[in-house]
Amino acid sequence: MSVVTLLYECQGIFSALILSVTGILVLLLDAFSPLGRKGRLGAVAVTGTLLALALLRMDSAGSTYFQGMVVWDRFSVFLSGVLLLGSVLVIFLSLDQLRRTGLECGEYYALVLFATTGMILMVQAAHFIVLFLGLEIFSLAIYILVGLARHEKRANEAAVKYVLLGGFASGFLLYGLTFIYGATGSLSMNAIAAHLGKGETVFNPYLLLGSALVLVGFAFKLALVPFHLWTPDVYEGAPTPVTAYMAVGVKAAVFGALVRTFWVALPAVHAHWTLFFWALAAMTMTVGNLMALAQDSIKRMLAFSSVAHAGYLFMAVVADSQDALTALLVYLLAYTVMNVGAFGVLVTVQNRQESGERLEDVRGLGRRSPFLAACMALFLFSLAGIPPTAGFVGKFMVFSAAVQSGYTGLVIVAVINSVIAAYYYLRVVITIYKPGDESSEVFSEPMTATLSAGEKGALLGAGALTALVGVWPHAFWNLARQAVHVLF
Amino acid sequence: MESVSFPLLSTLVFLPLLGVLVLLVVDRDNEPVQRWTALTVMGGCFGLALIVYAGFDATNVAYQFEEKIPWMPGLGMTYHLGVDGISLLLVMLTAFLGPLCVLACWSDIRYRLKEFLICLLLLQTGMLGVFVSLDLVLFYIFWEVMLIPMALLILIWGHPARRIYAAVKFFLYTMAGSVFMLVGILVLYFHHARTTGVASFDLVTLSGLNLPFSLQLWLFLAFGVAFAIKVPMFPFHTWLPDAHTEAPTVGSVVLAAVLLKMGTYGFLRFNLPLFPEASVFFMPVMVALALVGIIYGAFMCLVQEDLKRLIAFSSVSHLGFVILGLFSFTLQGMQGGVLQMINHGLSTGALFLLVGMLYERRHTRLIADFGGLSTPAPALTTFFMIATLASIGLPGLNGFVGEFLILLGTFRAKPVWAVLGATGVILAAWYMLWMFQRVFFGAVTHDENKRLRDLVPREIGVLVPVVGMIVWIGVAPTTFLEKSEPAVSHVLQKVRERVPTAEERPSAWMTACAAWEHIKGK
């Protein structure tokens, strides 16, 4: 391959390249920046990410690069946009948090950038090897990020758990891929689809076993019930910005890959798994919500609620239609902004308090910081799916697509779950606005003044998008619709 | 109907939001400006509502002042507003009470006034939006949106003892009902899209549907549960006494006067015209629940010791009358039902305002703590008496007209129901007059009550318009009935098109069986 061709091909992974180059730059600059001034590295990371975001092109109808290994189409562009947005917000939230917890180091930003690189590769993958590569790149980065607070027992435990179970997940996925390779003779998505033919359902035990194992691998990463057992501990142990990043970034990337796997490469086995998908979705949201109901720690509650949201998202996969996938993308966007926002408020509260994770810690936040309280209320109402917020739009679209495909039963399970979820979200809002015991109030002075610019920016950005998607869903629906178009 | 060039209804609905924006920038300590802003905005809303009322063509059955803008064309969602006679009256009620609510809480709210007024304005937008939406998704959004400010009102400014419990109960009950409505909306939408090829959430478009009976049954239940909880019909009423009792005065007023009407409005706007056969099929159940609500609510009133709780339970009873009227499927009954929605809003609203004023003076709502108040507070007693008499349906006041029409219509449908319903009127006279006697007559038993301050001019200013309306409706109900008549008879027509009329009907059950046979025959 000549240098010219290579350069031409590189435009297919342009975003990933910008991110990884910025990551390496951050690592290099790290050597020259004194302790306590590492925040500047964060600025470099944000610049890189914003650059990648700004250079996303929506014009392409889908071109493949590197001999069909990666594909750059509207679908990848949309998800890359969501991923980049998520990582910008997370970096903004991390700046202050890292300094305060003494975890500040250049690697942190580099790892976030590398993780995003992996995620983008994953949604771009048109070949299962690239998919696996992307998965491992972002997994490795996140394993480290989870265990960043290495003096903390909780973080160690979380990291070990995540590495072990993540390893299992990768193993399952890889094992599944070997079966698929054996059954079809290729790992390229298009080649597999061509081999199996479109239209009719194929019954091939090896292929079915292979796709089942791949699905298990994805389910681990997405924390679908019953593969979710690692979630609460890992989410709780990780530094809160990392938790936010895991909750949204990993979901967007893996859902993107899952959609490509089951729509582009393996539509022929899709019908075999419908019932299984149905059960996964129903179990995931029910178990997630019921467990969230019992939590006293907001962080754990949000962890379980993210399990439940994976269930709602998975409904779109069950519904299996163009509208459903469009809904999935809009929901992913909505979920990213509102969840990062909710975790973000938690981060800022944590920055000013010893722990800031328990329900008690946000008591009286409404008086201490009306801004933070209003943000939290907005994000929680959005997570609960109350209009006119992004969460409502996402849920509405997913439910609508599921009803359209005839899964009204599943939608009824989902709406009952929504009511359960409303309770625990509401409980946090209530605690926020509940007057605290004046005498025992440690932080009675207003906190608004002490919010750092990064935190304020992240919360305002996430809040604005949560409201915007809610009030003006049309624009986002159109973008998602075009993105999904390339898959059909 | 022609589209009006000036978006009058949108302005009406979103004017309170503008007020919210203004309030956000007003300085926290500058309470007079906050109050006046809210009052001006609410007054402006009422002014706009009056313009709508004046421009409304009572002879026209179609929706008027329509606004239709594509909102999500891909999904068939439109921003579609419009009023007919039924929604017009409810919009008027909402807009009429808005400024009075602000006046009523003038000195009542001691902390976080700004947030309180913001909640009140948001609530106003939500309620007005519900009554003028002609797109199902838009309706659902407004329906859900007003949940949050109402829950916050109870939560933050409610009575300290049990406000959290009450707020959560209110929120969860309503939300549990409305998510089923959401599923119903989606099913209706896709049925329409499949049968006609047109994707639309538009009420006008959807009402052209001829739904199969089995689907109607499910949809009636899906929508009905949301509305029945909001009404609240027995046995979904348990959130109401808690929410009412714990809410601040203005919250109770809004809750009783307007929010509950959203449930009965929903039945009239969606269930009856969209699912007429199912409505007839469920009529016996609905009537039975309404009658149980009337009598059970009344008996619960008899044992209440707390004034607010008593009025709350009386709402269960009164709203039972509304449902009874709507499901009598006679023009008189349904017209009475619509009028009674307004009446209940006015008289119960007035009662809650008065109890709030009493509470402000004495910090108690227990009947036992009062007695002989007519001596120290004659003005308060007079207003309370008018509201009480309106509530029990004294001829010449509004309650009489509504209840009379309802019972008349019900009697035409089935005399036994009317007889059972009429016991509610008797019971109402019993518990209300008894309560009135214990609170206002006799000797002053508590020393604190001897120096009870009578009403101040501001409070009288709040009460006079309400009492004026009470008398107006009582004396000249036609002014209002003629506005709603075309719309109501249109709904009735839709029900009768499919099923035998009330006069020909041997019994409700036989009609239901006939409807069932009719479907099976298909």
Image (cartoon, coloured by chain):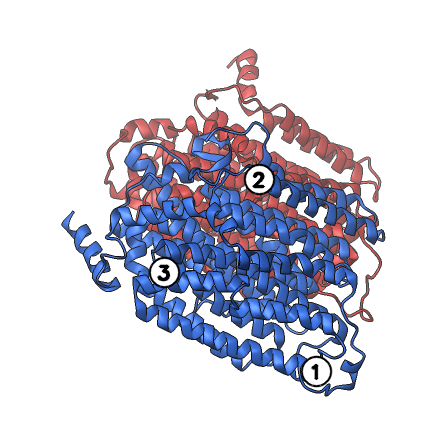
Secondary structure under tag 3 reads helix
Q: CA distance from mark 2 to mark 3?
A: 29 Å
Question: Chain B's colour?
Answer: blue
Circle 1 sits on which residue? Answer: B372
Mark 3 or mark 1, earlier in chain: 1
Residue B170 in the image: state x and y as whole percent.
55, 63
> Which residue occupies the foreground of this view, B500 or A37?
B500
> What chain does badge 1 belong to?
B
Secondary structure under tag 1 reads loop
Q: Say above or below: A265 vs B252.
A: above
Residue B54, disc: 2
The answer, for residue B474, to whether it is visible in the render is: yes
Establish whether labels 2 and 3 are both on one chain: yes
Question: Looking at the image, which residue is at 34% across and 56% down?
Answer: B329
Q: Residues within 10 Å of mark 2 (few under 14, many from 20)?
A: few
Q: CA distance from mark 3 to mark 1?
A: 40 Å
Q: Verify CB contact (< 8 Å) between mark 2 and mark 1.
A: no
Question: Looking at the image, which residue is at 63% across and 83% down?
Answer: B438
Q: Say above or below: A226 vs A466.
A: below
Question: Looking at the image, which residue is at 36% across and 68% down?
Answer: B418
Give the chain letter for red.
A
Q: Verify CB contact (< 8 Å) between mark 2 and mark 3.
A: no
Mark 2 or mark 1, earlier in chain: 2
Secondary structure under tag 2 reads helix
Q: Residues within 10 Å of mark 3 (few under 14, many from 20)?
A: many
In this picture, residue B249 sits left or right of residue B514: right
Q: Quadrant of the C terminus of chain A?
A: top left
User: Label 2 is placed on what type of residue?
Assistant: Ala
Mark 2 or mark 3, earlier in chain: 2
Circle 3 sits on which residue? Answer: B409
Residue, far left:
B521
